[in-house]
């Protein structure tokens, strides 16, 4: 890299950091500019390195096993040279590093380019590891092309590693050297090394698949024809299994099987087919060392096909849009308990749709019956508690379903009395409790002593892919006659939110936006001011305080950013970055 070119890059980077429009910046390639923009939008510190660290990286993964000898081989080829071969996983976390020079390796330690540290682009800015993952292709970053100043002494050449079977990107192989030693031949070397790693992935995966095939053939001979072999890329079954389970989604079934097994070698899990029938799968793990390469599943028959008026679980939720396996499993379990009139506690954070899920099950299994809804109150007087239990018992005896909301407010004694009332009534109504829990607390201690089955409804942030269907269902239920949709840009913005209030918070937001406009399509511009206008995220309360301090300093300094930066004790580059990050406009301070 020539001195003139380096100076051009420095000027371009300074212009970006001081508020210049990305379209007007000249010098860097389009790929580098795009990465700079992402780095700036992510709030990456251009002057200091801050990244995450995990103490124990997974060196037993298929990627690490396939790449370790390749990384060692590259290091041997460049022995004595300031060159390092680095392997990172699909999140940009460094797994392996081998260097040809001890002094150069110590210099890499100083910039945290070491096992356990993340070099994802949103942590450290433009670099050969994180940017290769973002662009899903080979990436070369030399000297001043790095967004972060501490990395500008280096050049890095990264290429993503793709699993040949699943076609997913599983990691990155990177070669790093001094910027002054950058040579295009290193880009060719890293691509050749990636090809070898991917070939070794095929060999390793092939061994796992052969193990699964051997287990399948042996099991089918021992236990007859009802056996299924499954992994993320394999589905082998006998005709009998195909007849029993019918058509199911391979990917969803493997996810369910893998989650059911966890670290165990055996488990059972129910499987709901596309036509609404249900079977229990007895699972046996097939492992290669500690790695789960697949499983054998033995179906134990099916339940009768539901009456024609009943719909499959996945389609019975007009008020509870679901597609993720965890939510579909929760819906299936609630539906089963409702059909069998087993008491049930539906647990989840406020606003996840616990009552909506119970109501959806009742629409399927108890259509036309009056649902009695009661709200439990913690520390209620004895008369109030007696009245609640009496009312629940009377409704159950009359054959009515009963939903008691806020079951977390009941004491252990109250829950015991309520469950005793349920057990005294047979072949009558159905009792469902909804229980609110805080984040990270899946069950209340009082409920754990009753023996009532529980179903956990995941928070919205763990099933964000359901959001488009949820928004469509919520808009359809809003008062009024107009048909309303949302733009793709608004949906992208909503999917970046964490939604601590879950579906209820989304519903309140949509109602607020609809009251403020008479249009038939909601856009980002319709979001309330507290969300900001950006595509990234809503500001936190602390960020709002920081934003306000910057605006006040700009006003006091009559719009001079250097004066405002000095009064706040931050650098000029930092205040320009924060002005862009917080979308502060001149109208606010001039």
Image: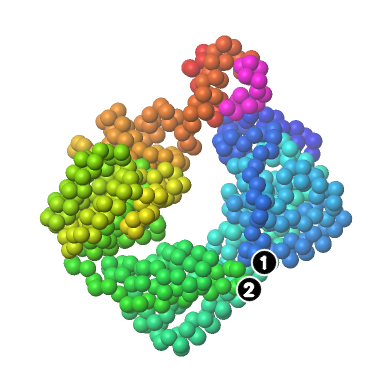
Quarter of the image where one finds residue 332: bottom left
Name the main secondary structure of what is drawn in magenta.
helix
49 versus 542 height, above or below: below
In the image, taking residue 465 as reference, residue 336 lies left or right, namely left
Nearer the observer, 195 or 546: 546
Residue 495 image point, x, y percent: 43, 43
> Nearer the N terminus, badge 1 or badge 2?
1
Nearer the observer, 215 or 366: 366
190 versus 11 height, above or below: below
Residue at position x 49%, y 26% in the image: 544
274 versus 180 height, above or below: below
- Residue at which label 1 appears: 66
Residue 573 image point, x, y percent: 65, 26
Nearer the observer, 342 or 306: 342
For label 2, the SS is helix
Residue 552 image point, x, y percent: 54, 15
Residue 143 in view, yes or no:
no
279 versus 563 height, above or below: below
Give the magenta range: 564-578
Quarter of the image containing the N terminus? Answer: top right
Is disc 1 in contact with disc 2, using a CB cutoff of under 8 Å?
A: yes
Q: Is residue 177 magenta?
A: no
Residue at position x 22%, y 55% in the image: 421
| Tag of residue 203 | 2
Residue 291 image point, x, y percent: 58, 68
In the image, taking residue 522 as reference, residue 144 lies left or right, namely right
Nearer the observer, 179 or 257: 257
For label 1, the SS is helix
């Amino acid at each position: 890299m020539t001195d003139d070119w380096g100076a051009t890059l420095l000027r371009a980077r300074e212009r970006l950091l001081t508020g210049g429009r990305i379209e007007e910046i000249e010098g860097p390639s389009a790929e580098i500019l795009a990465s700079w923009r992402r780095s700036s939008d992510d709030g990456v510190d251009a002057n200091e390195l801050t990244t995450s660290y995990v103490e124990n990286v997974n060196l037993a993964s298929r990627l690490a096993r396939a790449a370790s000898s390749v990384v060692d081989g590259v290091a041997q080829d460049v022995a004595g040279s300031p060159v390092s071969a680095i392997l990172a996983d699909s999140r940009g976390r460094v797994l392996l590093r081998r260097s040809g020079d001890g002094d150069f390796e110590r210099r890499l330690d100083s910039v945290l380019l070491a096992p356990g540290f993340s070099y994802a682009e949103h942590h450290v800015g433009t670099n050969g590891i994180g940017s290769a993952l973002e662009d899903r292709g080979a990436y070369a970053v030399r000297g001043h092309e790095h967004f972060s100043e501490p990395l500008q002494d280096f050049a890095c050449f990264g290429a993503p590693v793709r699993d040949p079977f699943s076609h997913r990107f599983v990691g990155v192989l990177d070669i790093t050297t001094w910027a002054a030693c950058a040579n295009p031949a290193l880009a060719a070397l890293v691509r050749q090394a990636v090809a070898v790693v991917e070939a070794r992935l095929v060999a390793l995966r092939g061994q796992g698949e052969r193990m699964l095939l051997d287990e399948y053939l042996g099991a089918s001979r021992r236990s007859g024809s009802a056996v299924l072999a499954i992994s993320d890329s394999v589905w082998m079954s006998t005709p009998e299994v195909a007849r029993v389970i019918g058509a199911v989604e391979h990917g969803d079934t493997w996810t369910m099987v893998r989650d059911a097994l966890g670290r165990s070698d055996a488990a059972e899990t129910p499987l709901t087919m596309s036509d609404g029938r249900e079977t229990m799968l007895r699972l046996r793990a097939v492992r290669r060392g500690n790695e789960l390469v697949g499983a054998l599943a033995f179906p134990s028959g099916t339940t009768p096909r539901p009456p024609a008026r009943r719909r499959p679980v996945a389609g019975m939720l007009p008020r509870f849009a679901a597609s993720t396996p965890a939510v579909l499993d929760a819906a299936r379990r609630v539906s089963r308990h409702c059909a069998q009139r087993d008491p049930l506690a539906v647990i989840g954070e406020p606003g996840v749709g616990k009552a909506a899920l119970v109501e959806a099950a009742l629409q399927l299994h108890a259509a036309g019956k009056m649902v009695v809804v009661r709200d439990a109150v913690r520390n209620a007087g004895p008369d109030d508690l007696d009245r609640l239990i009496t009312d629940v018992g009377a409704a159950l005896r009359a054959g009515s379903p009963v939903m008691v909301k806020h079951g977390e407010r009941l004491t252990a004694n109250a829950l015991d009395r309520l469950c005793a009332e349920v057990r005294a009534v047979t072949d009558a109504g159905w009792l469902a409790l909804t229980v609110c829990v805080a984040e990270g607390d899946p069950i209340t201690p009082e409920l754990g002593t009753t023996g009532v089955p529980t179903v956990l409804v995941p928070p919205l942030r763990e099933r964000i892919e359901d959001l488009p269907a949820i928004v469509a269902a919520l808009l359809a239920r809003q008062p009024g006659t107009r048909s309303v949709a949302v733009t793709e840009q608004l949906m992208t913005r909503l999917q970046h939110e964490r939604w601590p209030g879950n579906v209820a918070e989304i519903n309140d937001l949509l109602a607020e936006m609809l009251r403020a406009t008479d249009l038939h399509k909601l856009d980002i511009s319709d979001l309330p001011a507290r969300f900001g206008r950006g595509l990234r995220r809503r500001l936190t309360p602390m960020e709002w305080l920081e934003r306000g301090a910057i605006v006040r300093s700009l006003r006091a300094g009559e719009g001079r950013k250097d004066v405002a930066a000095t009064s706040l004790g931050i650098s000029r580059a930092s205040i320009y970055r924060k002005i862009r990050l917080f979308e502060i406009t001149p109208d606010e301070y001039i």
